Amino acid sequence: MRLWVALAIGWALAGPVLEADALDSLQRRLEKAAEPRILFVGNSYSFKVPEALAQLAQEGRHGVVVERVTRGGWTLRKHAGSKETLARIRGGKWDVVVLQEQSQLPSFSREQRGEQMIPHAKNLVEEIRRAGAVPVFFQTWGRRNGDLQNAGAFPDDTFAKMQARLIVGYREVADAAGGVLVVPVGEAWAEEMKAGNGKRLYARDGSHPSAAGVLHSARIFYRFFFGE
């Protein structure tokens, strides 16, 4: 059982035994595939992570194909309504499709998530499963100083507060979509923040990842997918 992989990177979701089984099943599928195929669906947070993941896999002697369909600022709602995105999901013979929501939306209120995020995420998960692939959610990180753009809704916000909301939001959508695995990248960033090393992960805007942030995120995906 590879539960240690999940625990080592801070993964904690409801139903740990079932989730561990699902993770084990995913890792075994990737092991058995001659050339695992992974697609990232998201926005600018996912621009460089797929390439970094492919490089790590190559260094680890895993022959993989990692591609992306990403647009700056896009939500899962936009992807669910995009003919291009749906065509890529349906026609790529993927093993895994990674879904990454707009960076703030999962941290909003439950009502907002229920209207703006969850229905569209569920539609994409259904498309992915019909295509024979495994969906996973990319749990992103809180902004370095919290959500300053929504100070009215989140006064005195911080990274830790925003990260806590993101964790709740991704757990909620994962449950609503029928038990989808969540890759806890944001939680791994939180560990770096607690250790005093987190600021290096951010670009100057305090939102997007620096080169170090891209590599750190890719390493979490690598451990999650390959158990190494």
Image (cartoon, rainbow, N blue to C red):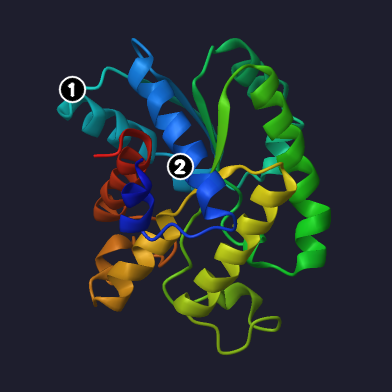
Q: Is residue 123 left or right of residue 174?
A: right
Asked where in the image residue 145 lies, by quadrant, the reply is bottom left
Residue at position x 60%, y 52% in the image: 102
Q: Considering the image in quadrants, where does the N terminus appear?
A: top left
Q: Nearer the viewer, residue 204 or 177?
A: 177
Q: Nearer the viewer, residue 17 or 87?
A: 17
Q: Earlier in the sequence, mark 1 or mark 2?
A: 2
Cα gap from disc 1 to disc 2, whole angstroms: 23 Å
Asked where in the image residue 200 lies, by quadrant, the reply is bottom left
Q: Amino acid at mark 1?
A: Arg
Residue named by callout 1: 61
Question: Residue 52, which numbered label?
Answer: none
Q: Nearer the viewer, residue 77 or 99?
A: 99
Expressed as whole percent of the image width and height from the top left, the position of residue 180 reads: 61, 42
Label 2, residues with CA under 10 Å away: few <14, some 14-19, many ≥20? many
Q: Amino acid at mark 2?
A: Ser
Whether residue 138 is visible here, answered yes or no, is no
Residue named by callout 2: 46
